[in-house]
Image: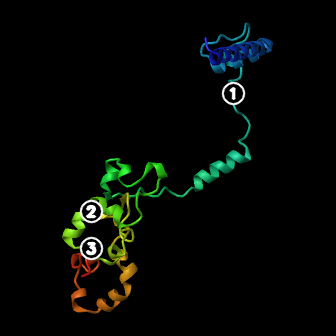
Amino acid sequence: MTKPDRRRDTCFLALLVAASAFVASCSPVSRYEVLSAVFDGVPPPAGVEAAAVRAPLARTEAPSKYLQDLRTLREQRPPAKPALVIRSVHQPVAERKCRACHDPAAGIENIAKDATLCDQCHEQQRREEGWDHGPINLGTCIPCHVAHRSQHEHLLAEALPGLCLHCHEDTAEEAAGMEYHSVPNFEDCSACHDPHRMY
């Protein structure tokens, strides 16, 4: 038997002796109340009916101020916000391939902090499709995309046109009066503009 096993057994035995001494020193009615709180089917003491003994651990006093305040807070709690609907998940995240972007030796840091990280998977696509949008030319994809999961398609950081208006608000104001911008899909910039290109 190992030392921790002996210590555990000794503690259990001491607890058992203390509990036995406590129960033995109680009056028959108190002993019945304690034992019936723990075990089912404990017979009542001689000459006393079970119904005459108060229910063990019954709380007859009023709840404390703390409990009253806690109940009030629960009742006043605002309704839970609806769960976010995730519309896109980055493939390495979905496949639990964290090491594709993160270096475990460096904690949660990314392997790279610029578009070279994205280029590990997207470089060929970027070159073939001629991606040259401003952020890409500056070496980053983060102004428009999030890395893990998004409420929007294509891992967008925000819905259109709000996402585009962060950088193109002045252009959009000028273009708003132009005839071709009064089409029904004006709210979707990508209907006419390639978000990865300069047109």
Task: Residue 167: give x, y in percent of width and height.
Answer: 38, 81
Q: In this view, does 133 lie to the left or right of 14?
A: left
Name which residue lies at 50% across and 57% down. 79
Please name which of the two marks, 2 or 1, marks the residue nearer to the observer: 2
Name which residue lies at 22% across and 76% down. 191
**Residue at mark 3 to residue at mark 1: CA–CA distance:** 69 Å
Residue 147 tag number: none
Measured along the vertical axis of the image, is residue 167 above or below residue 153? below
Task: Residue 20: give x, y in percent of width and height.
Answer: 74, 12
Residue 122 tag number: 2
Q: Is residue 74 left or right of residue 155?
A: right
Residue carrying label 1: 57
How packed mark 3 is, by other alpha carbons closer than 10 Å (few <14, some 14-19, many 20 or more), is some
**Residue type indicated by callout 3:** His
Looking at the picture, the colour scheme in use is rainbow
Q: In this view, does 106 lie to the left or right of 150?
A: right
The numbered mark, 3 or 2, whose residue comes first in the sequence reads 2
Q: Is 90 or 59 nearer to us in this picture?
A: 90
**Residue type indicated by callout 2:** His
Quadrant (top left/top right/bottom left/bottom right) for the N terminus: top right
**Residue at mark 2 to residue at mark 1: CA–CA distance:** 66 Å
The numbered mark, 2 or 1, whose residue comes first in the sequence reads 1
Residue carrying label 3: 196
The numbered mark, 3 or 1, whose residue comes first in the sequence reads 1
